Amino acid sequence: MKWMVCYWALVAGLILCGCGGVQYVDNAESREYSSLGIDYHDLEKAASDNIKSLLESGYVRSLAGLSKPKVLVISDVINDTMQHFSTQELTRKITRDMRNSGKFILTMAFAGSGGSKDKMLDSVRDARGNDEVNQYGVPEKGSIIAPELSLSGKIVQRNTKVKSKQRVDYFFLLTLTDLKSGLVVWDNEVNIIKVGKNTSAW
């Protein structure tokens, strides 16, 4: 019995020693630990540059004096890179600033791969006619508002070997489409280029 106590004490000690090497890094200082892969700073830049382009576009300027915001849906955003991350990390940053501008509002009733649909919308409507549910709070048919605009995009990666180094180009392509006419009302491309050793970790 005594040897088991010693064994678990040793295991606990090793775990605590292992955790001792972990440290928090401030966002501003985290660039020091960048790799050739897509990180927080890349997504911040892609979102910031794209939203700046959108809000300064002729289309958004034409919305001045609009009585109500345009209803926006997040469509497919394809991750065509070697990196595994959710494209919602990018789209939510962009749509948050779009909403804050007062000219757009996001719907969760529809979504492509770049967003997420709120499952409760369907669950609440499935309660229609259920005797256990107070029907006063159940939404009527036809109450969901259809989107007017669709945000879609693609993230592309291109690798090039340059002597002993590796260059990685990332292209963040976004498009805003009028769903009634099918016309593109805005599109933009943000490029991020990284160079590192061929042995750099992703």
Image (cartoon, grey):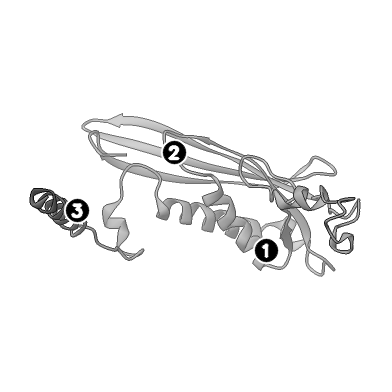
The CA span between labels 2 and 1 is 27 Å
Q: Are marks 2 and 1 in contact (CB under 8 Å)?
A: no
Among numbered discs 3 and 2, the one appearing first in the sequence = 3
Query: Does residue 194 lie above or below 134 as drawn?
Result: above
Quadrant in which residue 28 is drawn: bottom left
Q: Which SS class for mark 1?
A: helix
Q: Report the side of 136 relative to 155 (left or right).
A: right
Q: Amino acid at mark 1?
A: Arg
Mark 2 or 1, nearer chain start: 2
Residue 39 visible in the picture = yes
Q: Provide the residue designation for mark 2.
A: 84
Query: Foreground: 10 or 118?
Result: 10
| Residue 56 visible to an observer of this rendering | no
Q: Position of residue 121 (x, y in %)?
A: 76, 52
Q: What residue is disc 3 on?
A: 15
Dot 1 or dot 3, earlier in sequence: 3
Question: Could you say whether the residue bearing mark 3 is in a helix, strand or loop?
Answer: helix
Horizontal side, residue 87 vs residue 130: left or right: left
Separation (CA) of disc 3 from disc 2: 29 Å
The numbered mark at residue 87 is: none
**Disc ID at residue 99:** 1
What is the crowding at mark 3: few (fewer than 14 residues within 10 Å), some, or many (at least 20)? few
Q: Secondary structure at mark 2?
A: loop
Q: Amino acid at mark 2?
A: His
